[in-house]
Amino acid sequence: MPQRTGLYPRLLSHATRLLVEPALRAPYLSTVDWLHAFYGLSPDQRQIWQRARLDEVLTHASSDVPRYRSWAGSGNRLALESLPVVSKDVIRQDMTSFLSAARPLPPYVAKWTSGTTGECWSYPLDRRAWTQTYAAWLFFLGLTGYHYGEPLVVLGPHGTRTRAQSPPLDVLREKAERRHVVREGADLGTANSERRVLEASRRASALWYGYPGILAAMARAVADRESRGAPLAVGRPTAIVTSGEMLHPGWRLQIEQAFGAPVYDQYGCNDGGVLTQTCSAGRFHVAENLSIVEVLQDGQPCAPGVEGSITVTNLHAFVLPFLRYDTGDRGSLGVGTCPCGRPGQTLQAVRGRAWPSVLLPDGREVNSLDLSLELIDAPHVRRIQLLQRDTNELRVRLDVSPGFSAAEEERIRTFISRQCQHALRVTVLTDEEMELTRGGKHPFVIRRV
Ligand SMILES: [Zn+2]
C-alpha cells in the first residue's frame, strides 16, 4: 500500500481517479488498489477468479471467433486444456479468422509490437486488457518503492517517438506523470551512453526503466570514466527496472555497480498479455490478473522446474483472443512458494528470447543458449554477438574491455567451436560493429542461412 507518498503523487492519483479514469474509461489506478487486495486472497480464491474470466473468454471464442468456432464445432465450448497452441505467425497468416465477428466490438486500442526480431506487428487489444496490463505494470513498479507521479526516467529504444511525433495528449500525460523519456538514438557507443547517464542523472530520486542493453552500455561508460580518473556526475536512481530484452547476469552486475541501485527485471509479452517481474529471490512473479501462464513441451504441461515454451491465455482479450499463445520464449514454472514470501505463480529461468540456433553443415542445430559465454570465464567481454552467414563459418563479434588477452580470446574460440562440435570455423572479431534490431535490441545470434 502507498506509504510516505509525496504531495504531488497524492494529488495526481486523486485527480486521475476523479477525472482521467472516467474520461478514458480505463480505471488503471483503481485496478492497482484492487491488485493489492487480490494478492491478499488465497491461491484457491485467485484461481476461482481466473477461471471465471477464462470461462467468459472461451465462451466468446467458441461462438464468435471463426477459427475457434470451427475448432469447437457448432454448439460446443472449448476447454483450455484441449486447445491447440497458436503462435504469432499462425495468427498473422489469417488474422481475420482470429478476430471476433460479434458486433458491436468492445472498446479496443491498436497496439504495436516490434518483437525480439524487430519485426513489427499491429493488433487490436481490448481497452479492458490494456487497463489490466497498465495496472499490473504500475503495481510491479510499486514493489520497487515507486509511487505513481514520482519521477520516472525511460531509457527507451531508438524507435521511441520524438516529442514532435507524439500526440499532444500523450505529451501532457507524460508531463503530468513526470515521465522523462531519454531520446538518444540507437547508438550504444561511449559518447552517447555518457549523454544518457547525464540526462537521466538530472532527475533526482527517479526510477529508471529501460532496455538492459542500453543500461549496461551506460554502466560501462561510467566504469570507463572512473578507470580513467575522470568520473561522471552520476545520479543515483531509487531503483532500476529492465525490460524488453534479456538481462544477462554480467549486465545486472555492471548496472548495479555503476548506479548503486537495485535492479529488477521484467519479462513480458504485450501481445499475449503476460507480465512478470523479478523479486529479491530472482524469480519472475506473474501478474495473475492478466493471463493464465502455462509452460508446455509438445503441447503437454511441464512439471515445475522443467523448461518448456511459455504459453499464455489472455483473460481480457475479446476482439483478438490470445488463447494458448506461444510467446516464443522458454522458461520453467517456479517450484513451490517463492523464498521471498510473495504469493502467486512464478517463473524461473526465463531464457533466451528465442534467438535462432546455429546451423551445422550436416543440418543439426546448436541451441544459442549453449553458446552463452556465461558458461566459461570471459571477464573482459562486455557484449557478444554471433553472426552466421553460411554453414561453414560462425563469426563471433566481441566488445571487450582493456585487459582482454589472446588467452581469453582463444578460450572463447575453443569453447564455441567445441559447442558447435568443431563442425564450423569460428572467427573471433573484436573490431566489428554490433548490429541492433530495428527495435533497438541487441540480438545474441543473427542467422542469415
Ligand atoms: Zn519472489
Image: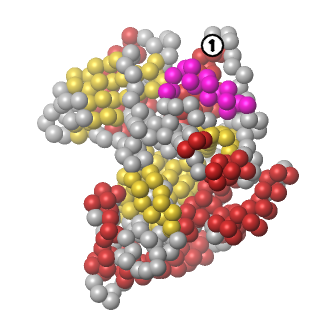
Colour scheme used in the picture?
secondary structure
Q: Main secondary structure of the magenta part?
A: helix
- Per the image, the residue denoted by label 1 is 227
Q: Residue at x 67, y 41 (%)?
A: 180
Q: Residue at x 49, y 27 (%)?
A: 187
Question: Would residue 337 be seen by someone viewing this image from the given angle?
Answer: no
**Residue 57 relative to residue 392: left or right:** right
Identify the amino acid type marked 1.
Ser
Q: Residue at x 31, y 41 (%)?
A: 356
Q: Is residue 446 magenta?
A: no
- Span colored in magenta: 187-202
Total marks placed: 1
User: Picture coordinates of residue 24 (x, y %)?
Assistant: 64, 66
**Residue 148 relative to residue 325: left or right:** right
Q: Residue at x 37, y 43 (%)?
A: 117
Q: Is residue 190 magenta?
A: yes
Q: Residue furthest left?
A: 362
Q: Nearer the viewer, residue 414 or 311?
A: 311
User: Picture coordinates of residue 129 (x, y %)?
Assistant: 53, 66
User: Picture coordinates of residue 97 (x, y %)?
Assistant: 31, 71
